[in-house]
Amino acid sequence: QLHLLNHPGLVPHRMGLLLLLVLGTLAVSCTTTSVPLKVPSHLPFLLRGCNDADMLAVAASVLQGINNDLKEGYVMSLNRVSAVQEHRQDGLGSLFYFTLDVLHTNCHVLSKKPWRDCEERHLHEQVYGKCKALYYVNRPLRILYLPAYNCTLRPASTVSRRKIWRMCPDCPSPINLSDPKVLETATETLAKFNEDSKSGQYSLVKVTRASHQWDFGPSYFVEYLIKESPDIKTEASSSGYQPTDSGPVGICRGSLSQSFEEKNFVDINCDFFQSQLSPLKGENLLFTRKFLFYQKNKSTHSPSKDVLSGSVQYLPELDDEESQETDPAEAFPVHLDLTTNPQGEPLNVSFLFYGPMIKKLFVLPFPKEEQRFAECPGNASMSNPIVLPP
């Protein structure tokens, strides 16, 4: 969530390009602003355009920071910027208040893949929602930092089953993960994978998605996390290899279909995550040094609410009648307030800077969505109303 570019030559290639794009776009916007900023007389916020190139670049970095912080679930992609307000920080840069409409992709967050490298899911299996985030940008010092975020998500199929069924009557429908057929499908497909595996054996950690379909017979589709199993059938164990028990190492997508002749057809494909243990270098090393410095001096500074705070909640299912009766604001409650004080509160960010000086941002209650630029929300990558939050 924090990126420091004081040593550009040491920044990893992919993240370096992303951060240089964000900061470069912001720098250009200082001299060529297509739409003038508007400052409401009753607010300290600058209302920014949701389609402006510089705000889209920052929004992409915000969402990448959120995805990097998640420990479970699927990588979210940016569908559109719904609102963005800027609060300038008296010589310390700007604190942005973003409201983003997001979609699920087919990448698990443990893969650590950039969201732009992940495919969005089809409409019948899509999960959509809204995120609110605070994002600090200091262009002169090349600092990007995500202090807090909150996301609310809901499966599209649980809100508009009938609409999706009319558009795609043969598409798979989601089923409860506790259905016995789900575990049976995961078990049989993983057994098939282990039978063909030459690298080792794997065991089931957790089923993450499940659906079913009727074609020439019942078909079940599952996605699940796997880990290395202590039961290694290869000769690797005799050479001193010991499987780690550090958690999931990959995600599998399997299907179990049955024909009229009651023959089972098994299909399985697994993707393994890249190692999370990589040498510290470049920006990672620089961030670690600063973070350790902050932890060492935390009791001296006595900061409050300066550690990243993030959460994602999944809403319960609604049928079509309930979705029509539910108030839009209640249907998608997303709250992010580091303070409820209308006068605002300081946020200690000294750990982002070198030196003994205490640096504080001024945080205000999150602005209401109607307090946004006239052209907001911005353009959506998936414009179907089913996946656009109210």
Image (spheres, rainbow, N blue to C red):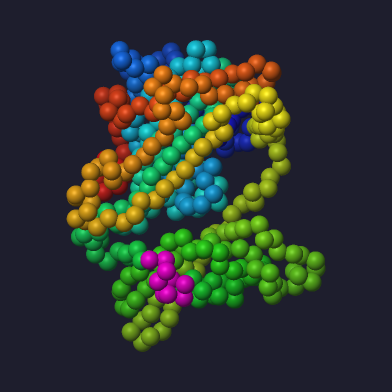
Q: Is residue 267 above or below residue 304?
A: below
**Left or right of 93 in this view: 178:** left
Q: Is residue 317 above or below residue 277?
A: below
Q: Which residues are magenta?
A: 176-184
As for residue 179 lying within the magenta part, the answer is yes
**Residue 263 in view, yes or no:** yes
User: Where's residue 131, x and y in %?
Assistant: 40, 39
Q: Which residue shows up at 41% across the image and 84% down it?
A: 263
**Left or right of 149 in this view: 201:** right
Q: Is residue 198 above or below residue 208?
A: below
Q: Which residue shows up at 51% across the image and 74% down it?
A: 187
User: Where's residue 60, x and y in %?
Assistant: 45, 35
User: Where's residue 152, x and y in %?
Assistant: 38, 45
**Left or right of 298 in this view: 132:** left
Quadrant where the image shows the C terminus: top left
Q: Nearer the viewer, residue 357 or 224?
A: 357
Quadrant where the image shows the N terminus: top right
Q: Which residue shows up at 47% across the image and 68% down it?
A: 254
Q: As drawn, which residue projects farthest toward the bottom?
A: 261
As for residue 15 lying within the magenta part, the answer is no
